[in-house]
Amino acid sequence: MKYQALVVDEIDGTFVKTIKTLNRKNLPDNEVLIKVEYSALNYKDALSASGHKGITRNFPHTPGIDAAGEVIESKSDLWKAGDKVIVTSYDFGMNTAGGFGELISVPAEWPVRLPSGWTTRDAMIMGTSGFTAALALYKMEENRQHPDMGPILVTGATGALGTASIALLKKAGYNVIASSGKESAYGDLEVLGADEIISREAVDDQSNKPFLSPKWAGAIDSVGGNTLTTILKAAMANANVAVCGLVASPEFSATVYPFIIKGNNLLGIETATCPRWVREKLWENLSGKWNFSLPQHMIREVGLDQLETEIERMLSGKSFGRVILKHQ
């Protein structure tokens, strides 16, 4: 059985992306074989496709941490041919061949059932970005976050996670402050549900002050670095700050004051090893009470031959909204 995939090769220290026709024997011998209908492009995929050894150790490799499609073979009682499934998280797309291939082979515990009423395209519009936003809100609310506490800040607002977070928070009844360096996108952020939009610089305090005037009751942050430091300085009492990314830097400097004086909480959001029961609950929420939609112009559907361009756009900070991959 042959299939096409975007393959990243390491050649003399340079990482080269090529669309290749592969054979099923190129896949690992796992329990469930799935024909991928849709995948999506995430920042982690862009890093993997560029040779980031912190994401993917061995090459050649097919990235794609998101996939939705149909089971065509199963060695497990959990799944049968014809089942529609979503695959995200675990090691998928990092060191296991991912959704940028038309076929994937994964352990039986990795897929979750496609929610009733959804298409595989719907699932990938949500994808890891929607799931990450949902996990962030879930952990915040487990820690007693509530809309009445005040607005939630979303940084990196024009990225896939940012747009999903804004739409999700608005659906869940929160007021949202969106931070972005792309003034041209402010109108779109308002359409998504942002109640207030501030510049990137407004969340980049350069003073040595331990506190700033309280501005938000929580945050979903994908930027890290000094942005995260500033978020903590300007957080209200008992704020929950969900840490989801490191676009600016994996390092930040902070005092203990926000934690011991204001009772702030720093919540780590890690989707890869999220327990299966939580994973199933969150997909249920995303297809139910938290089901949000993105404007169609914020969704770009591409083929394998367009992925390399989209990867470069994402790495250069020019990507906006959601990029989904349709396999033929």
Image (cartoon, rainbow, N blue to C red):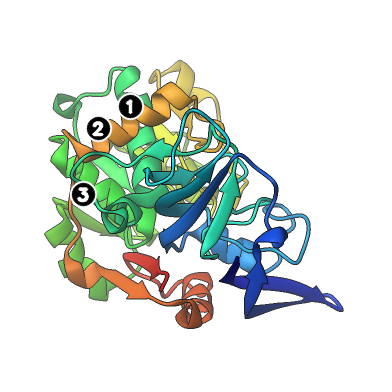
- Amino acid at dot 1: Lys
N-terminal of the pair, mark 3 or mark 1, is 3
The secondary element bearing badge 2 is classed as helix
Asked whether, in this view, residue 214 is left or right of residue 41, the answer is left
Q: Earlier in the sequence, mark 3 or mark 2?
A: 3
Residue corresponding to mark 1: 281
- Where disc 1 sits, the SS reads helix
Amino acid type, residue under disc 2 in the picture:
Asn
CA separation, marks 3 and 2? 14 Å
The residue nearer to you, when weighing 37 against 166, is 37
> Dots 2 and 1: beta carbons under 8 Å?
yes
The CA span between labels 2 and 1 is: 6 Å
**Amino acid on which disc 3 is placed:** Ala
Label 3: which residue? 167
- Examine the rendered structure and indicate whether residue 217 appears above or below residue 162: above
Identify the disc placed on residue 285.
Answer: 2
Whether residue 175 is visible: no
Residue 163: which quarter of the image? bottom left
Considering depth in this image, is 121 or 41 the residue closer to the camera?
121
In the image, 219: left or right of 67? left
Disc 3 crowd, CA 10 A, few/some/many (<14, 14-19, 20+): many
What residue is at 35 percent from the left and 55 percent from the top?
A: 124
Residue 290 position within the rendered picture, expressed as x and y whole percent measured from the top left? 20, 37
Q: Please give the name of the residue rendered at 43% of the width and 44% of the height, measured from the top-left corner.
A: 81
**Quarter that holds the C terminus:** bottom left
Q: Nearer the viewer, mark 3 or mark 1?
A: 1
| Residue 10 on image: x %, y % | 79, 73
